[in-house]
Amino acid sequence: MINTIYRLSAARRFEIAFEDIDLFGENAIVRPTHLSICNADMRYYLGTRDAKVMAEKLPMALIHEGAGYVVFDPTGKFKYGDKVVMVPNMPTEENEFIAENYLRSSKFCGSSMDGLLQEYVSISPKRLVLLPDDINMNVAAFTEIVSVSVHAISRFDKIAHACRRRIGVWGDGNLGYITSLFIKKMFPESELIIFGISKEKLADFTFADATYHVNEIPKDMWIDHAFECVGGNGSPIAIEQIIGVVNPEATVSILGVSEYPVPVNTRMILEKGLRFFGSSRSGVADFEKTVEMYEKFPEITDYLGNIVSSVNTVRTLNDIKAAFEKDSRKAFGKTIMKWEE
């Protein structure tokens, strides 16, 4: 079976490649129908990654956030037409102590192997998670980033002490919104406080108990635990504020990605006895838990639908490029590509 792959060959330039898919192997065949553009995809598309990294990884198909339907599954686990979300993390080994998303040997779609920007995706049935028939597929498309938040919150639940009267989230972007929403669902008894830089974006956190602009934090503010969802150039400021506001022996989850080293106030980390931990990517168990929460709390997908900035019908290479260009100009939200034949 001949498959069409849409690879980024240079900044802002896609090319089409054709490769054969083995129909007699162990992999399932999935037709992607809804794909979501991530900030990591945009760094490749715009060429803002290091030139050496670009040279090493391109040409490569982008996209690691996507959902679609099963065309064929030789194992019989899925039937034709089943809606599924694809897990982009591809482990090559198992480790008793290290999760699949932290194994250095694991491959990842759109980073160390071709991503989901293909006509069909050949993928192990073990890397597929069944979706409800009635799910909003525009939301299902970015289940991957949602599962990263669920993964981080689940790890927090195991690490942090049980005093969780007030949890703070720094970051009013997509990651902050998603993480905050799931914190509120997973710890409904905790007071949830959001800290951000845009009052317009903060107004969208209607499920939170309070929101503050980072320049207007009350002097008597305190937090039991915190999540940093800022990343980039804002990381140093956010982490410094968190260290100053959290109570002693707080646990701080770092989720924001920064391209450069971030200085931290180790003196106050030591004085307060703080715990910092980082989380990246996710595994099958996190996807399964995320979908379970979609079903348990149907309102979650309604809230997540609020951060879909645009849905773009894609049929050609030019349509793909147009969607990426639109994403490069957006102020907030997720850009969805709805792939139609």
Image: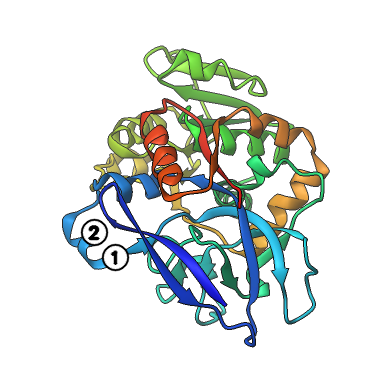
Q: Position of residue 119 (x, y in %)?
A: 54, 62
Asked if one can make out residue 317 in the rendered structure from this viewpoint, the answer is yes
Q: Position of residue 220 (x, y in %)?
A: 47, 15
What's the residue type where badge 2 is placed? Answer: Met
Q: CA distance from mark 1 to mark 2?
A: 5 Å
Residue that numbered label 1 is attached to: 57
SS at mark 2 in the image: helix
Residue 40, compared with residue 59, is above or below; it is above
Q: Is residue 106 left or right of residue 29?
A: left
What's the residue type where badge 1 is placed? Answer: Lys
Q: Residue at x 20, y 63 (%)?
A: 55
- Nearest to the observer: residue 174 or residue 183: 174
Asked if one can make out residue 274 in the rendered structure from this viewpoint, the answer is no
Within 10 Å of the Cα at label 1, are there few (<14), some (14-19), or many (20+) other Cα atoms?
some
- Nearest to the observer: residue 36 or residue 203: 36
Q: Is residue 65 left or right of residue 11?
A: right
Q: Is residue 186 left or right of residue 43?
A: right
Q: Position of residue 30 (x, y in %)?
A: 64, 65
Which quadrant of the figure has residue 235? top left
Residue 187, compared with residue 9, is above or below; it is above
Q: Position of residue 322 (x, y in %)?
A: 41, 38
Labelled pair 1, 2 in contact (Cβ < 8 Å): yes
Quadrant placement of the N terminus:
bottom right
Q: Residue at x 80, y 37 (%)?
A: 298
Say the numbered circle drawn on residue 110. Answer: none
Residue that numbered label 2 is attached to: 54
Q: Residue furthest bottom?
A: 24
